[in-house]
Amino acid sequence: MSELVTGEAVALELRPARLPSRALAVLLDLVVAMAAYIVVSLVLMVSTASLDEAAQIALSIATFLLVLVGGPIAVETLSHGRSLGKLACGLRVVRDDGGPIRFRHALVRGAIGLVEILLTFGVVACIASLVSARGRRLGDVFAGTLVVRERVPTGRAAFVPPPPPWLVGRFSALDLSAVPDGLWLAVRQYLTRMNQLDPQVSWSMAERLASDLAARTGTPAPQNVPPAAYLAAVVNERQAREVRRSFVGGPANGARFTGGAAPVPGAAPVPGTTAPGTHPTHPPHAAHASYVPSTPPSGHVLPEPSAQAEPAADRPATTGFVPPA
């Protein structure tokens, strides 16, 4: 299986489409577009029979551009990358970071597609797709897009582990507006796969992602928090904000999302969650024992808690994290 890999060497769950499926999708789109073009041309020919030859030629050129070029651009923009042919073949056009395309992406793909698909009968597009490692034609390269497969074999859903309870809500004042979607995706994919990596590789990757995230937020990462736990806590904070934003008049700003079901307005607080207007304390139970962080490699020693911290017997023994003082 061919996968996309980010700069942090994290594999994304996207499967680039190959030439046969893309060619079939383009062929279906061309059949529909040509049928629409013939119908519109016949209607215009009958309704403009009284015009002179120059006007009829101008209308024919305009019809060609609007139906065969403007039509696919409008369809891909409105459907977020799913034309009729791609819908039939289970394909979709997405950005390089996996997000939905916009009008400018569809415009560049359609304008270049006029040359590499229509005027050259698809020869240039086929050569470019065969040369590209991810099967991209020239329109995809200049637009920064990729055609991926949507209908793939279903597997076990990736689970993003929650942070340790003593970190929930600690980054509520963090500014996350400057963090790009690509970095969020890389962090999420790392958290779902960190237990499958070599401990030393996992630790160094977590440190690199944590430094990138701290640079985007403008706030340095805490020195007494392991990088994997820091990433999980910041992702948890982002999820909590998304949940609060999706509920109109829902949970108060102090409510925290702990990785389980979304909070319901008016419902009693779930044990182990932080009540509105309060600050998280050390966990009374090991509800998050399933979170197994990346183990620091040899040479990396986590700081010991200060004398004011709670006794070790009062903390969950299976989280692997030591609460800060």
Image (tube, rainbow, N blue to C red):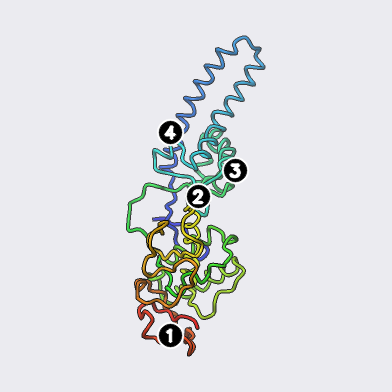
Q: Compare marks 1 and 2 and give the one earlier in the sequence.
A: 2
Q: Compare marks 4 and 2 and give the one earlier in the sequence.
A: 4
Q: Residues within 10 Å of mark 1 (few under 14, many from 20)?
A: some
**Mark 2 → mark 3, Cα distance in angstroms:** 25 Å
Q: Residue furthest bottom?
A: 307
Residue at 53% across, 67% down:
172
Residue 218, percent across and down? 62, 69
Hey, what amino acid is under mark 3? Arg
Q: Residues within 10 Å of mark 4 (few under 14, many from 20)?
A: some
Residue receiving disc 1: 310
Hey, what amino acid is under mark 1? Glu
Q: Secondary structure at mark 4?
A: helix
Hey, what amino acid is under mark 4? Leu
- Choose mark 2 or mark 3, whichever is in front: 3
Q: Secondary structure at mark 1?
A: loop
Residue at 41% across, 59% down:
263
**Mark 3 → mark 1, Cα distance in angstroms:** 56 Å
Hey, what amino acid is under mark 2? Val
- Choose mark 1 or mark 2, whichever is in front: 1
Please tell me in which quadrant of the rendered image residue 20 appears: top left
Q: State which quarter of the image contains the N terminus.
A: bottom left
Q: Compare marks 3 and 4 and give the one earlier in the sequence.
A: 4
Residue 220, percent across and down? 59, 74
Residue receiving disc 4: 28
Along the viewing direction, whichever of 242 and 153 lies nearer the viewer: 242
When the figure is inspected, residue 210 is found, relative to residue 101, above or below; the finding is below
- Choose mark 4 or mark 1, whichever is in front: 1
Residue receiving disc 3: 104
